[in-house]
Amino acid sequence: MQRIELGGCKIELMPVVKGLVSEGDRVRKAIEEMSPDLVCISISKEELEGLARKEDYAKYEMSFLEQVYQVHLETFGEVKLPPPCFVDAYDLCMAKGIKMLPIDMNEELYSEVYCLKVGGLDLLRESYFSNRAHKLRLDHSSPEGMVRSWDRRVNRAKGFRELNQEREKHMAECLRRLGGKKATVLALVECERADGVRAWLKRPVTAP
C-alpha cells in the first residue's frame, strides 16, 4: 500500500488482484487494521449494487478471455467471480457500517468513452488476440506480474489502452475530490490500474 495525502484526507492505495480468493483475506485484514472512514473500490456504481445481489453470483457466465485469464491465475490459488477482493470488502463494510464509494466509470459514461476511443481496427485486433489467447506466455513470477502482463497483451490496441487510461484518470479524480475532507480512506484498485491511478494523483492540479 502507498499513502497519498490530499488536504486533510489520508488515502491508502491498495492494489488488488481480481479473482484470487486469497485477496479477500488481504482486504479484510487491511480494513480491520485501518478501520477507515471510507472504502473506495475500482468498480462502477452498477457493479457495487450487483454485489448486494448474492443470488445472482452463480448466474455469471465468463467470456472466453475470462476463462483463459482464470486458468493462468489459478497458478496462484483458487479463483472466484465476482472478485473476492471486492465481495469481502463489501460484506465487511456492510457489517461494520463503513461507507463505500465506487470510483470507476458508471455504465453510461463507460459506453460514451468506449465509443470515442475504440474503433474498428481496435476490435479487429482484439478478435485476433482472442483467437490466440490460449497460447499466451505470461509472467508467472507473481499474481501481480501475471495480471499486469495479461493486461499489457489484452490492451495492446491503442483504443483499449486509451480507454483504460481514461478509467484511471476518472478514478483519480474521484479520489481527489475527497481532498477537502478529514478522513482516512482505503482505496482498493485492481493492480493493473493502480500505477496509473497513482500517477494521475501525483500530477499537479491545473486551473480550469
Image (tube, helix red, strand yellow):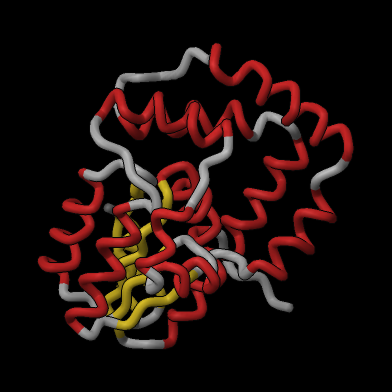
Q: Is residue 107 left or right of residue 53?
A: right
In the figure, residue 186 lies in which quadrant?
bottom left
In-front residue for pair 169/6: 169
Point out the residue furthest to the right here. Answer: 120
Residue at image x 19%, y 51%? 26
What percent of the width, then of the height, locates residue 172?
52, 64
Residue at image x 76%, y 36%? 158
In the figure, residue 153 lies in which quadrant?
top right
Residue at image x 27%, y 52%? 1
What percent of the width, then of the height, locates residue 168?
57, 56
Q: Is residue 95 left or right of residue 197?
A: left
In-front residue for pair 10/57: 57
Asked if 76 appears above or below 176 in the picture, the reply is above
What percent of the width, then of the height, locates residue 68?
49, 27
Q: Is residue 110 left or right of residue 28?
A: right
What percent of the width, then of the height, locates residue 125?
77, 27
Residue at image x 52%, y 73%? 45
